[in-house]
Amino acid sequence: MPRASIGAPIKGPSALGSDPRRLWNLTRTLAVSDFKLRFFGSALGYLWQLVRPLLLFGVLYVVFTQVIRIGGDVELYPVALLLGVVCFTFFSEATGGAVGSLVEREALIRKVEFPRLAVPLSSVLTAVLNVALNLVAVLVFLLIAGGRVRLSWLEVPFLVLALALFAAGLGMLLSALYVRYRDVKPIWEVALQILFYGSPIFYPIDAVAERSELAAKLLMLNPFAAILQQARHALVAPSHPSAAEAIGGTLPLLAPVAIGVAVIALGYRTFSRRAPHIAEEL
Amino acid sequence: MNARTPAVVVDGVSKTFALPHERVHTLKERVLHPLRRTTTDTLHALREVSFAVAPGEFFGIVGRNGSGKSTLLKCMAGIYSTDRGQIYLDGRLSAFIELGVGFSMDLPARDNVIINATMLGLSPREARRRVEAVVDFAELGEFVDLKLKNYSSGMLVRLAFAVMIQVDADILLIDEVLAVGDAAFQQKCFDEFVRIREAGRTILLVTHDMGAVHRFCDRAMLLERGRIVAVDEPDVVGNRYLEINFSETARNDAEHQRAPGSTERMGDGNAEILEAWFENEAGERVTVLPVGGRCSFAARVRFVAAVDDPLFGVVLQNDRRDTVLAASTLWSNPTPGRFSPGQEIDYLVSFDNLLVPGRYHATPAVARQGGGIAWIDRRERLVSVLVSGPSRTDAVVELPYEVHVRPATGSPAPTEVPS
């Protein structure tokens, strides 16, 4: 038989595919077209992407500086709040978009061979494009509010990348599960709300630490909270405690890092196991 | 086996789907009924399918709905994983299961061409470079920046097809994409396939359309219930396909006709026609006859009383009730002898099947000879048979013929035109 000369058999559908360039090309193409489509037909276009977090920020700002007075003694509280809102918007967009992504792109998955991972990753990448835009707005606010340009700003892109990777890990996990269990979506929406109140977004982590050191440290176990806190330290003002300071040292900081890595690994493993069968189960 | 390395080898591929009776979609159902196991049916979509396609071949895959042909295509395209078996491809493969996959109506044609071509395997840079070629082929040059929602469906199909043929692949898998579009467009598609094939590429076409298989394919494969029935010349496979298709229809029809008293019956009852059937060349009872072969009509008769020299016959009518055959023993064997009560005989009417494809109804009869015809038993349209095969004309029968062109005898030689 001529089989020996024809080479290895085809592998069937998989998460990564055989060509990483193709995975990247597809992820990028899907994300860019999604980004273009998002505000298609709206008068303000991309501006909406800025307006939404700004509106949430405005409400929170009024409530927590004029009514409840949480952030009175925090340096550059408004900018820290805005950064928290922007990061949370990014995280909820990336994961929330990824959950249903496989089901929404059913037509594509059932009709074309391509690395399946491109679908949830493109949802995350779309959110990255948006957050890049929003961070520019944060910078403008920061400079207006009197923030100083510091070298530590260079940390921010890496923190965004870390947050994107964490979101991608969750996105892989959730999108693969959602194909089978349609309750994943409402559960995740609730989880995101808990995350909003359970992370130091509108309250400073110091305020928690004053009441209970342990509670603050437990909150910082959450990779999202750790990244956000570090971003405030690096971007807004050094008086905001860094992630390591908030959790009590560099060694304890390994805990949220480990949790993040574990989530990414679990997400990838789940996704690549399900990937060959996604087309059949949709 | 072809001396050259085959372009495609499918080796013992099996694929099953688990079809749950009650799909548990929500965790609540899971939690509330933890003990209720979802029972599943196993659907064997493909069973041990093996074949090879030579490079440059135009290979047809035909089969009825649910025969597994689309599953096979999706396995080859890498969309489904196989349960068992291997698929080997020599070269790059592109599968066209649907035209215009990933088109977004709100984006202009240019963006959509890039997205679609990237999905099909080009790099974005390559895709951007070919936008012009695609738009030229689709003859949509002036509409390239128009949003797709403003396109007519014909323009959409043209654009999608133009993208598809821009994708370089050594092996093309095509799944009935031609079902869309008008006749002129389909012709353009096929012209393009022929051109692609002449460029030495391999094409696998999945279709119901036997006409396309006849016209374009070098070889074809017939699938039925996940198994290969035949891999052969398109004509042979086409006939098998029609047989399978119609034998199923014939079976359904037979069930409908089982109602008692549905056939009209005449005669004095001295003999009974018990049953009637058709036989193929090998003498097997069939409900479908291929065009062309030798075949027979047969009926079984039991005599109730003694009868001398009866006449056995049959009338064959098509669906329009044209009589295409009236056969009897009147001329060939007027004195078959004496039959005693209780005796059973079969009589056979054999003929070359010159009938055109369609359904034919047989009315067998036993009669007494003499002045006029006195029926002993006559059963109107007792059985029917389906004649299958490619239809070449719409004549009632296909008489064998030859056509000659010759100079007219005795006519004057052509005169030179004076210049």
Image (cartoon, grey):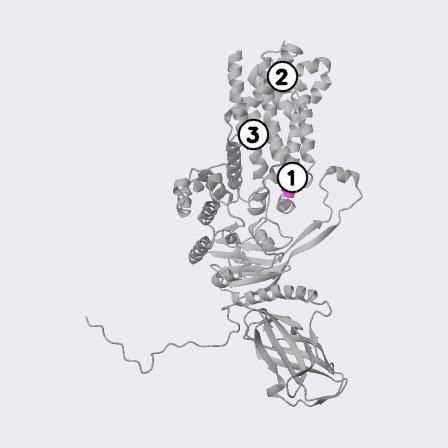
- Counting from the top left corner in percent of width and height, residue B65 is at 61, 57
- Three-letter amino acid code at disc 2? Leu
Give the SS element for disc 1: helix
Pointer 1 or 3: first along the chain: 3
- Three-letter amino acid code at disc 3? Ala
Disc 2 to disc 1, C-alpha distance: 34 Å
- The answer to whether residue A245 is visible is yes
Looking at the rendering, the stretch of residues picked out in magenta corresponds to A269-274
Q: Chain of mark 2?
A: A
Q: Chain of mark 1?
A: A
The question of residue A97 being in magenta is answered with: no
Pointer 3 or 2: first along the chain: 2
- Three-letter amino acid code at disc 1? Ala
Residue at 51% x, 40% y is A21
Q: Main secondary structure of the magenta part?
A: helix
* Disc 3 packing (10 Å; few <14; some 14–19; many ≥20): many
> Residue A176 has which mark?
1
Label 2 vs label 1, nearer the camera:
2
- Counting from the top left corner in percent of width and height, residue A82 is at 58, 18
Residue that mark 2 sits on? A60
Q: Chain of mark 3?
A: A
Pointer 2 or 1: first along the chain: 2
Q: Say if B66 sits above or below B258 in the image.
A: above
* Disc 2 packing (10 Å; few <14; some 14–19; many ≥20): some
Residue that mark 3 sits on? A127
Q: Residue furthest right?
A: B35
Disc 1 to disc 3, C-alpha distance: 19 Å
